[in-house]
Amino acid sequence: MNPTSLASRLGNIAPFHVMELAKMAAELESQGRSIIHMGIGEPDFTAAPQVIEAASLAMARGLTQYTSALGMPALRQAISAHYQSVYGLQVGAERIIVTAGASGALLLACAALVEKGTEVLMPDPSYPCNRHFVAAFDGQAKMIPSGPAERFQLSDEMVRANWDAATRGVLLASPSNPTGTSIDPAELGRIVASVRERGGFTIVDEIYQGLSYDAAPFSALSLGEDVIVINSFSKYFNMTGWRLGWLVVPESLVPQIEKLAQNLFICASAISQHAGLACFAPASLALFEERKAEFRRRRDYIVPALEGIGFRIPVKPDGAFYVYADCSALADDADRLTRDMLERAGVVMVPGLDFGSHAARRHIRVSYATSMENLREAVARLKAYFKG
């Protein structure tokens, strides 16, 4: 195909630096090198036994046909009940749309809300795919530099200062990838109110909300029915490859989202939906809470361990499984540092360049979604690397 026939929006979609590191790591492993992966944002735990059993049973019974584009009613009701049980919120099942992962949910939300020439405010740093979903619909992600003072998040003051005639809404993540930090609920409430005053939309990515360690459970859905929330079975429920998520929208928006889902996806995987129902069984939830406690234990190990090596952690992560570490006391370029650590120490981490441009070359993202044994070995290797 002639390159000139490609859509110009492709120029706004940047490749992942982490994928280049993954290729380098795979090549080193093929040579027999031992590599510790602390780059990928994926739980090392897999689906709960009850989930696997439910998937097998669904296949054995032939429950593999298309479902409603909105998702199985039983699963939508189970998610609704989960909001009541965990957050004390009454979120009607009719507002919940089951999607092909959180990515499918973000795609549907942006397809419904983003137009050519409109801006969506996001913090810099942010998960890169979020801005690329905006770009896919010819919108512009307006990246607002955010640092430790704001917990690497947007504040109400920042939203007000950066809102202009082209701004359509805000896209936030709490807890955030890459920083593992959450927005204070009161501050998020002020942001929602400011966006509402301006007739805009608020989308909050809560895929790591189940992995919040230091505060009472909170969802942005408590701030009003006009807040749009994204969630997923990938992180807390340990089902990354099952590609199952959900979207909560105002009831008035459901018919429009359904129309888009029918045309773009038909439906989320039927097998995954039947399996997802088993996530809400008491035994499954107990297991997920045990795993959450293990993630917290890993965080409480890796943060001081990194500080002991010489990294600065200006904001302790309170959720997800990431540390956004300032490496400027150790090196002058995070990109070169991550490549060198991989080649010489056999440890994979991600440079800040993947997540924005603000102070990106002084930060790396560390994922602790791996075993304590691996974390301890990685710390030992890094200590030797920096001493050498």
Image (cartoon, rainbow, N blue to C red):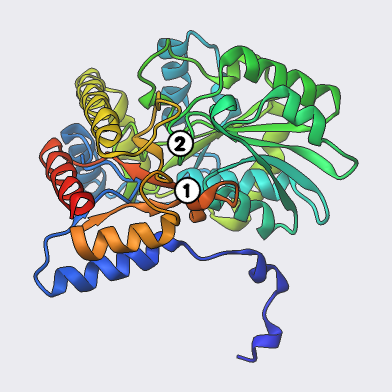
Tell me where residue 343 sits by quadrant.
bottom left
The amino acid type of the residue labelled 1 equals Arg
The quadrant the C terminus occupies is bottom left
Considering only vertical position in the picture, is 381 above or below 170? below
The quadrant the N terminus occupies is bottom right
The residue carrying pointer 1 sits among few (fewer than 14), some (14 to 19) or many (20 or more) residues within 10 Å by Cα, namely many
Circle 2 sits on which residue?
179
The amino acid type of the residue labelled 2 equals Thr
- Residue 154 seen anywhere in this rendered image of the structure: yes
Label annotation for residue 181: none
Circle 1 sits on which residue?
362
- Residue 69 seen anywhere in this rendered image of the structure: no
Report x, y in % for residue 20.
38, 68
44 displayed left or right of 15? left
Report x, y in % for residue 167.
82, 41
Considering only vertical position in the picture, is 23 above or below 239? below
Considering every residue shown, the one lying at the far right of the view is 165
- Say what secondary structure mark 1 lies in: helix
Q: Is 273 or 19 nearer to us in this picture? A: 19
Q: Is 192 or 123 nearer to us in this picture? A: 123
Considering every residue shown, the one lying at the far bottom of the view is 2
